[in-house]
Each structure stands twice: as C-alpha cells, then as structure tokens.
Amino acid sequence: MTVLSGWIIMKILMVFHLKLTGLLMKLLKILIVIPKELARLIAEREGLSPENVILGAGSTEIMNLAIQAYGRKGEILTSDPTYFDFIFYAEQAGCELCQVPVDENFKIDLPAMANQISSATSLVYICNPNNPTGTIIEGKHLRSFCDEAAKNCLILIDEAYYEYVDATAYFSMAELIRKGKNILVTRTFSKIYGLAGLRVGYGLAPPEVIENLKKVQMNFASIAYPSLKAAIKAYQDHQFTRMAKEKNRLVRAYLERELERLGLFWIPSQTNFVLIEVQRSAREVAEALEKRKILIRPFTFRGRNWIRVSLGTLSEIQAFLSALNFSCFLG
C-alpha cells in the first residue's frame, strides 16, 4: 500500500467516523427529546411538573419498578382478586403478599385493607377500576384511605381503565400527588388509546418517588421511538378517546341486556370488560369457546366460576353470546 492510498483510506475513515458520530448524536437527541415531550404533555394535563412523570414499557414496567424499589422492603398489601400480572411480578421478586378479599359487592374492601396495614407494610396496590371485577371505589372513600395509608407506605393506584369510567363518584388520585402525598398512579396507552402492542405506560408521583423508581429502571430508553411518537399523537386525539369510550359504553350496555335475558349473573363493570359467572367449569367454558375461535379469560374465586370478556365490536359480542349459549347450555 502506498502512502497516498493509506492517506485516502484514513480520510475516508475519518469522514465515516464523523458522519456516524453525527448520526448517533441525532439519535441520542431523539431518544431524550421525544420522551421529554410525552412527559411534558402528560404533566401539563395533570397540573403537574415533568419531574412528577416516569415513562415505561407499559404500566406494568412502572408497577415492577415499584415492587423492586418499595415492595421488597416489607409486605405488599392488595386485594383478592386483582390484576394478575402485579401478583406475578411480586411473587417473582420474592415479596411477601397480603391479599384482602373483595367485599360482598365484589368491590375492594378498603376498611379491611386499612386494618391490615402495619409497620411491615411497604407498598399498597389498589387497582381502580379493579381487574378482573370491573368495579370501582368511590373517589372520596379512596382519597380518605390514601390520606391515612400514605403516611406509612407508598400507595400504588393502578388506573389502567380510568378513562372508561362513567360513574360521577369516581375520580383519579392524581390530585393527591399535587398535594405531595406518597402516591404513585400508573396508567397505560394499551386500553382506550388502542396501543396495546406498542408498550407505553406512565406513572405519576412526587419527585422523590420518581427518583427512587428511576434508580431501579435499567434502561431509560425502554420505549421504542415509534411507540413514543404514536403515544404523543394518541394522547392529543381527544375525539378518538371520546368515540372509543362511547362505543365501549354502548357495547357494554348491549352485553348486559343480553346476559340478563340469558339469566346469567355478571358483575356491573366500569371498564372495557365484564366478569360473568358460569355454571360449568370456567376452564371448560373457555376451552369450548376457543374451539369456536373466541378467546376469554377463565377465573375461579369464592368457589365460583367466572369468565372475563373484553368488549369488542357489537358483531364480536354477538358472536361471543351465540358461542357462550352453545358452550354453557348445549355443549
């Protein structure tokens, strides 16, 4: 190789290095600026500061961070039944769990939970609306509970379904964060925004709680760039969310009328799913429905069999009802 050719190769490598460095800097800027833009929009709507917001790959990531940062220090208190993934993550982390059964109306029993809080309690998890029951806790009751319980430990309020709620007695616990309470509210873009596969969620909390969560968050760029861009667009599309909520309400009302006609018991829901009691094994019903290309989630609690049905389109619910009738009474 001549000196001239070596010099040319060196120049080419230098140009390539500069271009690659520039590209990486642009990419890094995107990875920092885009999440900040979403956090700013969320904070603005909630009357909070961006320092009150943490983003994650779905709200389940935020919950898992809370389990790692707080739950492992003591006992986690929650209801039974509640969101399965939270229980799974807590068990995987080796946490001690105390689950309080829901009351006779299938609502989270706040007085019973309050009685279980002790010096060992490090995290309280409340899913409101609750999954899988679809029931809610009235805002004034949950606020009173949080005011007291937050003096002892972090209270995690899972509001994954809050956009669907019609009940006027319900309101978000984000207002307590504005007052500096020891509260973490988690939400997701997987439900009413329709971005389930993109894995975008967020948490709202006082700055010191956010900092503790970030200490155990392994990757600041855990959300893909296209997912962030989609979330920003979806968050500002108020017309779509209003339409989605109204369609959900109409389909839910139709399903409830048909369940009453069939003589089936269900738990009145404030979400985009309904929990229905069946007289056969819930797993058998789920398997029979799957053969007819309909997927639902079977549950068993209080010695009774239940299936949880997500609300799709009207035609999808009609197909489900037809298959359910066959599976429960003819199968």
Image (cartoon, rainbow, N blue to C red):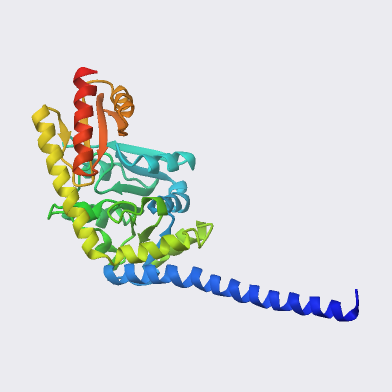
Q: Which of the 4 quarters of the picture holds residue 230?
A: bottom left
Quadrant of the snapshot with the N terminus: bottom right
Q: Which of the 4 quarters of the picture holds residue 263?
A: top left
Q: Position of residue 118 (x, y in %)?
A: 34, 45
Question: Height in image: 135 above or below 325?
Answer: below
Pick the residue in front: 220 or 244: 244
Question: Height in image: 51 above or below 82?
Answer: below
As drawn, the residue found furthest toward the top would be 330
Quadrant of the snapshot with the C terminus: top left
Q: Which residue corresponds to the image point at 31% horizontal and 30% vertical from the top-left?
A: 298
Q: Position of residue 319 (x, y in %)?
A: 22, 34
Number of numbered discs present? 0
Is 104 left or right of 159, judged from the image as shown? Answer: left
Question: Height in image: 325 above or below 133?
Answer: above
Q: Which residue corresponds to the image point at 39% horizontal and 42% vertical from the top-left?
A: 85
Pick the residue in front: 231 or 55: 231
Is 246 left or right of 300, judged from the image as shown? Answer: left
Q: Position of residue 38 (x, y in %)?
A: 38, 68
Pick the residue in front: 154 or 168: 168
Q: Which residue corresponds to the image point at 27% horizontal and 54% vertical from the top-left?
A: 192
Residue 238 in sight here: yes
Is 279 left or right of 154, judged from the image as shown? Answer: left
Q: Position of residue 18 (x, y in %)?
A: 67, 78
Q: Which residue corresponds to the image point at 41% horizontal and 54% vertical from the top-left?
A: 198
Residue 138 in sight here: no
Question: Height in image: 279 above or below 212?
Answer: above
